[in-house]
Amino acid sequence: MKPLLCLLALCAPLLCLPCSAAEPLRIASWSRNSEPATVAAEAVLSRAYAELDQPIEFIELPVRRALRALLAGEVDANLYRIAALAQEQPQLRRVDTPVLTLAAYSYANKGGPRPVSWDDLTGLRVAHLRGVLLIEQQLPAEARRVEAASVEELFRLLALQMVDIVVTVEPRLAVPLGQRVSTTFVRAEVELAVLPMHHFLGERHAELARRLDAVLAHMKASGELDRLLQRRLQQR
């Protein structure tokens, strides 16, 4: 009996040790220091995962490399992607409540055209940022495309009347890009496209995706999600 008591006494300190913290979930993100949508989405996910007591770590990767890393299991999640990725990569787990929403907008000088659809851009000189796939795919073939390397260049072309329209993709709730440059540019009220952006996790995180969706849905219903997005998007 005495040896047993001695053994229990030796083991007691080990039994009292605190449980080790959960491993951080590795989330691939991109343009973390320059893209307002990234900053806003990271704030939303940080708040939601905190509700679940799940530590997270954002990993800076180029946007295309981030998806390859998720598919290879090198990271646990991607910050956000379009909904259709769930059909293209059914092994991934999409969180159904969007983290944020992007929209395609058009800008013109005062008195300029106000398109309500992509077809209305036919025959116009349309400037957009190089490499924005949505715009490249949706612009009518008859539009006169002008690619720019920066937001500043986009609106310089418009100010000099070298183009008729500027088309951008930017987050809802953010200060309009054109207004950041000059109040002389007018954004059309009609959105040319709407893109809800969803958080995606790897295959083994199906249960976590379900729990996270419940948190985000509650944040959306209470207005907390939009308030957090607006605060983050408008402070930059």
Image (cartoon, grey):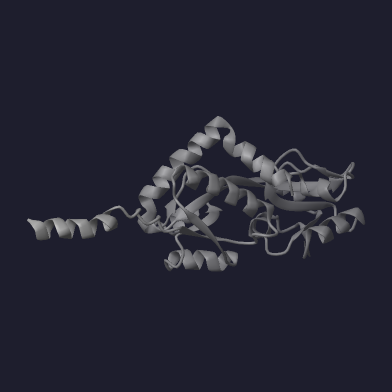
From what the image shows, is residue 23 above or below residue 222? below
Determine the residue located farthest toward the left in the rendered image. 1
Q: Nearer the viewer, residue 110 or 44?
A: 44
Q: Is residue 137 left or right of residue 53?
A: right
Q: Is residue 203 left or right of residue 126?
A: left
Disc count in the image?
A: 0
**In the rendered image, is residue 172 in sight?**
no
From what the image shows, is residue 19 above or below residue 172? below
Residue 219 pos. (x, y %):
53, 36
Q: Nearer the viewer, residue 236 or 96?
A: 236
**Residue at position x 47%, y 42% from top?**
51
Q: Is residue 7 left or right of residue 75?
A: left
**Residue at position x 45%, y 68% from top?**
74
**In the rendered image, is residue 64 in sight?**
yes
Determine the residue located farthest toward the front in the rendered image. 2
Q: Quadrant of residue 194?
A: top right
**Residue at position x 48%, y 67% from top?**
69
Determine the residue located farthest toward the right in the rendered image. 160
Q: Quadrant of residue 229?
A: top right
Residue 133 pos. (x, y %):
64, 60
Q: Quadrant of the N terminus?
A: bottom left
Residue 168 pos. (x, y %):
73, 52
Q: Nearer the viewer, residue 137 or 88?
A: 88
Residue 8 pos. (x, y %):
18, 56
**Residue at position x 49%, y 34% from top?**
218
